[in-house]
Image: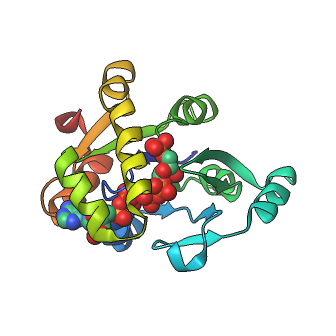
Amino acid sequence: MAGRLIYLIGPSGSGKDSLLDAARARLAERGCRIVRRVITRSAEAMGEAAQGVSPQQFAAMQAEGAFALSWQANGLSYGIPRQIDDWLAAGDDVLVNGSRAHLAQARERYPTALVLLLTVDQAVLRQRLIARGREALADIEARLARNAQFTAGLITGNGAGLFVLDNSGPLEHTVERLLCCLDHGHSAYA
Ligand SMILES: Nc1ncnc2c1ncn2[C@@H]1O[C@H](COP(=O)(O)OP(=O)(O)O)[C@@H](O)[C@H]1O
Ligand SMILES: O=P(O)(O)OC[C@H]1O[C@H](OP(=O)(O)OP(=O)(O)O)[C@H](O)[C@@H]1O
């Protein structure tokens, strides 16, 4: 039986990487793999388990068909290795740190995808982005502006099959909600 694609989305700074790190061992126990993304970001600025490549390397990988999904945002290119199709075919669930802007394409390719939207209060989001210190202030403002563009439309336009996880509180609570969502049909979080 094919595995499920779990497509985690949410604003930059909402806590996607932190959530995946915190839940990693418990996801593995459930046979859920977390895919390692390919990003045109320098290794020093990576701050997550991803493969950093140059724009030229990314373009070559894309031309070879190395990616199941890919998108551009925040001045960067992101790729999801094709290997996920083998994992899904083998029956493993696969969790992808995705893009809100690329949701329609992801659903087109993976119609049964479970979509999880991580949310956080905008004021908290600003504080977390500043505290993380990965981007310059101008880049942080651009990410906040990008977020405002998505907030309302995503939930109203994609209600079916989209589940909201609020990460404004302690990370451990969000981990529990994520696992509950995966294990029990998630209706409490829709
Ligand atoms: N529940 C939480 N409570 C407090 N800080 C958090 C929480 N979740 C994430 N953070 C912090 O917020 C910042 C952004 O989180 P990160 O995982 O990098 O977000 P994303 O991957 O969505 O961009 C990090 O500094 C992280 O430590
Ligand atoms: O369409 P969006 O939902 O805005 O998403 C666009 C990209 O931005 C985020 O990455 P970012 O470089 O900010 O990394 P981060 O998630 O680790 O902060 C997210 O993981 C996506 O790859």
Quadrant observed for ligand 1 in the rendered image: bottom left
Instruction: Please identify the residue farthest to the bottom as the structure is shown.
Output: 44
* Residue 171, position as x, y percentages in the image: 20, 64
* Residue 170, position as x, y percentages in the image: 13, 63
Residue sitting at 43 percent across and 65 percent down? Answer: 135
Is 97 on the left or on the right of 43, as rendered?
A: left
Residue sitting at 65 percent across and 50 percent down? Answer: 89
Quadrant housing the N terminus: top right
Q: Relative to residue 125, is residue 52 depicted above or below?
A: below
Of 135 and 26, the residue lying toward us: 135
Is 10 on the left or on the right of 173, as rendered?
A: right
Of 80 and 120, the residue lying toward us: 120
Query: Number of numbered discs present?
Result: 0
Quadrant housing the C terminus: top left
Residue sitting at 62 percent across and 57 percent down? Answer: 87
Its colouring scheme is rainbow
Please indicate, yes or no, whether residue 171 appears anywhere in the rendered image: no
* Residue 98, position as x, y percentages in the image: 50, 48
Q: Relative to residue 17, is residue 65 depicted above or below?
A: above
Instruction: Please identify the residue farthest to the top as the structure is shown.
Output: 157
Residue sitting at 20 percent across and 58 percent down? Answer: 176
Please indicate, yes or no, whether residue 103 appears anywhere in the rendered image: yes
Instruction: Please identify the residue farthest to the front as the structure is shown.
Output: 138
